[in-house]
Structure formats: C-alpha cells, structure tokens
Amino acid sequence: MAFTEDLTAMFDVTYGFAVNATYKTRTIPVIFDEQYYAEQGIDVDIASSRPAATCKTSDVSTAAEGDSIVIDGTTYTVTTVMPDGTGITVLSLVK
C-alpha cells in the first residue's frame, strides 16, 4: 500500500511555514531553510549556509540538477533532488 497524506496544511503559505516560490514558471509553496553550519578541520575552518527547499513531490516531479527556483526574490540553482518516498522532495540549492 502506497503512503498517502494530505500535505495541504504543511505547505500553507498563509498560516503555515511555507512561502511561495517560482519553479518552471509556476508558483508553488515551499518550506525554505538556509541552515547555517560551521565545520572545523585540522587546517581550515569553514562557515557557510546550505539553502534547501522542501516541496511536495507532485510540484517538483520533473526536478533536475541545474534547474532554477526563485524564493523571496533570490534565484537559486538546484544541486540535488532528494525525494523521500512520502510525497516530500528536498531540493538542495546554491545561489
């Protein structure tokens, strides 16, 4: 039996955590995260952010590396497409 869930509340841009994004000329709701991280190495310390968009898989079913998505006026390039099999896909992004 396939997993099915109503994701409407999770991706509600009015009362939820989602924001509108433009992907392939369509407006879709995404949960945008630009997590800050720091890594320490022997010779180098790195601090950066890892932007990601959590989407309904049905909205990004044709997503591919190199695609563009605009979130809050910033254009990002998709670097990794990670569907999780539950109807959610995370797009790793770079500016």
Image (spheres, rainbow, N blue to C red):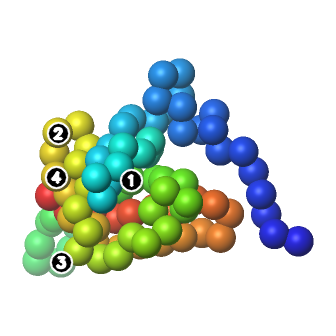
**Horizontal relation, residue 51 to residue 16: left or right:** left
Q: Position of residue 50 (x, y in %)?
A: 28, 58
Secondary structure under the numbered disc 2 in the rendered image: loop
Crowd rating for badge 4 (residues with CA inside 10 Å; few <14, some 14–19, many 20+): some
- Front disc: 2 or 3: 2
Q: How far, Cα to Cα, is label 3 from label 1?
A: 32 Å
Q: Amino acid at mark 3?
A: Ile
Outermost residue, top side? 15
Secondary structure category for the residue under label 4 = strand
CA distance separating discs 4 and 1: 12 Å
**Tag 1–tag 2 contact (CB < 8 Å):** no
**Going from the N terminus, do you reach mark 2 or mark 3 first?**
3
Reading the image, the residue beneath label 4 is 75
Tag 4: residue type? Thr
Question: Residue sitting at 43 percent across and 72 percent down?
Answer: 62
Q: Residue at x 48, y 22 (%)?
A: 14
- Of labels 3 and 1, earlier in sequence is 3
Crowd rating for badge 1 (residues with CA inside 10 Å; few <14, some 14–19, many 20+): many
Please state which of the two labelled residues, at mark 1 or mark 2, is closer to the viewer: 2
Which residue in the structure is indicated by mark 2?
73
**Residue type pointed to by label 1:** Ala
C-alpha separation, residue under disc 2 versus residue under disc 4: 7 Å
Whichever of labels 3 and 4 marks the residue nearer the N terminus, that label is: 3
* Residue wearing tag 3: 42
As drawn, 24 above or below 80:
above
- Cβ atoms under marks 2 and 4 closer than 8 Å: no
Residue assigned mark 1: 53
Residue 49: x and y in percent read 23, 54
Sequence-first tag of 1 and 2: 1
Q: Considering the numbered disc 3 on the image, is that residue within a helix, a strand or a loop?
A: loop
Q: Residue 55 location, x and y as percent?
A: 48, 53
Q: Residues within 10 Å of mark 3 (few under 14, many from 20)?
A: few
